[in-house]
Image (cartoon, helix red, strand yellow):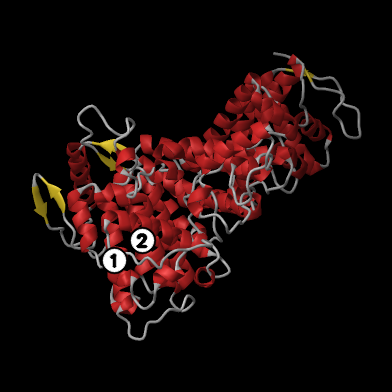
Amino acid sequence: MGMELPKDHAESHEMEDVNISDLELVYHVREALTSVQSGDNDNYNQLVAVMHLSGRLDPDNRALLETSLKALSGAVSYIDISHHESLLVSIFGMSMWNYDPDIMDALKGLIISLAASSGKYVDSCLTMLVGNFTPPSYFLDKLKEPHGLERKHQVLSRVHAALKSIFDLVPLAPMRLLPIVVQRMPTVHNKHERLKLIVVYTENMLKLESSAMGELVRSTLLMAVVDRLIDLDMEIGWDDILHDDFSKGIFEMELEDVEEAADDAEQVGDELPSGSISRKSLSGNLIAELLDSLLVLTFEHLESCEGTGRLIEVFEILLQSFQITVLNAYKSKFAQFVMFYACALDPENCGLRFATMLADVFVSGLYPPLTRMSSVSYLASYLSRARFLSPCFIVSLLKRLVDWCLEYCNIPGGNINPKAHRVFYSGCQAIMYVLCFRMRSIMDVPRLKSQLLLMPLETVLKHNLNPLKVCLPSVVSEFLQQSKAARLFTVSETFIFNDLLESELSRDFGGLERLDMFFPFDPCLLKKSDSFIRPNFIYWSMVKTAYHGDEEDNSDEDVDEDNGDHVMVDGMGRSPDEQDLDLDEFEYSLNKMSITPKNSFSCRLDGELRQPMKMPSRIRPSTSPESL
């Protein structure tokens, strides 16, 4: 078809009206490119002007731009970086978001041709495509509209298709792409538009990870996403969500109870008590809203990985990133829920692997004290809150912690010293914290009860190191109440704490970081993320404590029609047969993973007790005296 070059895009000269066919335009582009070397820039300048066409184009200009881009694709061998710099700058500065699909396709084809023609253009082509991960600022609000979402799909599908084609043509392109993607991640500012860009950009990073070239870029991209999550997490100060009130214990500051108090406060016009934690305290916090959105994106990505059978592979990368970044972050608040949700999606593999890793770090003498304390805090909180973990597995981990603490007690000359023995005290507190949540479900299963009673727990807790006087008093107090009711061991009547959280010994053991008060899987305060976590989570209000009286045990809520012959497991009533099935499934899971809990406990299978197999050396951690 014939078309007319525009007059109004020349820089310093008048452009003539020239009617040419599509084929003639291809030759015209080649001639424009070669004529520059002889000093004739008129046609070249006209070509550069065409690259600047954008906005609402009339049919002729749309056709001109599309055909010019296609013509350039066939003439990339004529493009020279030293003579055609202005043309290249114009091309690499184009945004697909500004054009219709036909022009997008033509631009995609040109970028692929440039990348394949010379190694000199690969980085520029990749940078241009990554730049199209996010829309121009004026387009952000349109992403909420159907038309905007359609344009988003049109652009991003072509961007990722172009990246795939370049990777196929240029084998080293993935390695060139990684630093570009990481370096161009939008920075965090308190501008709402900027935060939206980060969400869209992260969405593209995860899409790239799951693409055909993901195998080459997966580790770096996932770690970059986790780094961004922890950066945002650190932007949210603890003062934003928690005001210390040492008259309250940790079990009084549960999310569900506080939400009820918030509803009552609205009705009577009172404020929430200080020391409470609530989603309301994060209301309007743009960083928290951004982190919430990114966590949801990551959760949905993990679901996709689980559906395609890639979750275990992705989980191993996340686990490595967790050990490097999250575990050593100062009291991370929300980023760790990525690990929790991955474990919930695959309890048999990821769920057990995560807990085992945390235990390995704690018992190993190769890590610094703060890392070991953080690790056992994560382990205690995870074992307490993860609804999908078998009580049998929880008992195995408790046994491992108790054995390590007992071995520590055998070191000569041990006397109460919160700072010198803080790793030991963190282990003792972890044991008590887990039992606060899980004691009832363990004691209601005879064989698990026997295993718990056989643990040297009393020897550890009544040692001269005196963990009952050093650990967080609210944890100790709750643990002692349940132990007394369950007859776990003899409780001295002298352990009564009138001022629960004002223990100086506890403060000394926790240090400036207050790791004695760090329970990383406390209820998630981010609204959208919590909807993913909640079905897999145990809240304190769901816990059936061991000191509840017979009257409450016989309530209509707890007794079924079959004479109430149920036991409490993970906060839910199940029959003994169902409990046996859970234990069978647990042993099957361990066999499937080729691991066995490192202790002498046994799980019943087919009506008999079986001793655990020896754990393979590649998984079995060292708990020798040298590692203490």
- Residue 136, position as x, y percentages in the image: 72, 34
Left-right relation of 413 to 512: left
From the viewer's side, name the closer residue of 433 and 158. Answer: 433
From the viewer's side, name the closer residue of 468 and 8. Answer: 468
Q: Is residue 438 visible?
A: yes
Residue position for label 1: 457
Measured Cα–Cα span from mark 2 to mark 1: 9 Å
The amino acid type found where label 1 is placed reads Leu
From the viewer's side, name the closer residue of 31 and 49. Answer: 49
- Residue 144, position as x, y percentages in the image: 65, 25
- Residue 401, position as x, y percentages in the image: 32, 64
Q: Residues within 10 Å of mark 1 (few under 14, many from 20)?
A: many
Question: Does residue 529 sit above or below 425 in this rendering?
Answer: above
Q: Secondary structure at mark 1?
A: helix
Q: Secondary structure at mark 2?
A: helix
Quarter holding residue 302 = top left
The amino acid type found where label 2 is placed reads Ile
Disc 2, disc 1: CB below 8 Å? yes
Left-right relation of 562 to 280: left
Reading the chain from its start, which is encountered first: label 2 or label 1?
2
Q: Residues within 10 Å of mark 2 (few under 14, many from 20)?
A: many
Residue position for label 2: 431
Q: Nearer the viewer, mark 2 or mark 1?
A: 1
Specify the label residue 586 is tagged with.
none
Check the picture and name the quadrant holding the N terminus: top right
